[in-house]
Image (cartoon, helix red, strand yellow):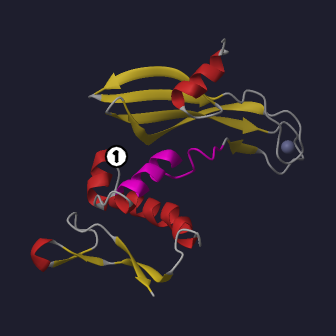
């Protein structure tokens, strides 16, 4: 079987539409530089072929690889419309895999949500392992987890659902959500 270059990169990365530019090891972490394969794009406003306006790098955390933390450097393409009358003017490319103003890839956010919601790890511990802030992980839990709670098939027989802001630490002490001993609990009332 023969796979052309960008397809090999997509398989290696697991991110469709991206290719790998460089792999480095920095301080025990895997550092991947990536770009999209979209070298020709049309203006969203008028449809003419866009001109390059340079690059802008963003750094996000990704899922672990080979047991080591991964940083993804996405060298984003910036574009401009050559039509003087076009209101669009300039823009930076977007991806559903790495959303704007997020410190993590979407798949890393999904992994973080599962570690908290399914595996019972604390938000603080997961935040530490991804080297991101507590609010980044809690945001992922609420955003990625909410559709699962809303899925009627998964909550059949449950009368009420909510996120508990406190949980019981060992020996019955109640500690506030945010404390690393206290994973937020999704509570279900049945019957
Ligand atoms: Zn245009």
- The residue most toward the top is 2
- Could you tell me residue 28's position as x and y percent? 27, 28
Residue 99 in view (yes/no)? yes
Q: Is residue 40 above or below residue 85?
A: above
Q: Is residue 19 visible?
A: no
Q: Mark 1 — residue?
A: 130
Quick one: quadrant of the C terminus? bottom left
User: Does the stretch in magenta take in 100?
Assistant: yes
Closer-to-camera residue (22/83): 22
Q: Nearer the viewer, residue 65 or 128?
A: 65
Residue stretch in magenta: 94-115
* Ligand 1 quadrant assignment: top right
Residue 48 on image: x %, y %: 89, 36
Residue 31 in percent (x, y) is at 40, 28
Nearer-the-camera pick, 26 or 158:
158
Number of labels in the image equals: 1
Decide which of 182, 31 is in the foreground and name it.
Answer: 182
Whether 189 is among the magenta residues is no
Disc 1 crowd, CA 10 A, few/some/many (<14, 14-19, 20+):
many
Q: In what quadrant of the picture does the N terminus appear?
A: top right
């Amino acid at each position: 079987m023969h796979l052309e270059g960008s397809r090999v990169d997509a398989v290696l990365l697991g991110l469709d539409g991206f290719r790998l530019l460089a792999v480095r090891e920095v301080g025990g972490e895997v550092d991947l530089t990536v770009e999209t394969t979209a070298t020709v794009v049309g203006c969203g406003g008028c449809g003419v072929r866009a001109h390059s306006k340079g690059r802008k790098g963003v750094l996000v955390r990704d899922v672990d690889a080979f047991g080591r933390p991964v940083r993804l450097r996405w060298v984003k393409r910036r574009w401009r419309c050559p039509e003087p009358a076009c209101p669009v003017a300039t823009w930076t490319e977007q991806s559903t895999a790495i959303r704007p103003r997020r410190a993590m890839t979407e798949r890393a956010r999904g992994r973080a949500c599962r570690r908290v919601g399914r595996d019972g790890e604390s938000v603080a511990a997961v935040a530490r392992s991804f080297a991101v802030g507590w609010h980044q992980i809690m945001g992922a839990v609420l955003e990625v987890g909410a559709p699962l709670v809303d899925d009627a098939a998964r909550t059949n027989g449950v009368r009420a659902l909510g996120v508990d802001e406190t949980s019981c630490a060992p020996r019955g002490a109640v500690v506030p959500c945010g404390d690393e001993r206290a994973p937020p609990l999704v509570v279900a009332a049945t019957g």
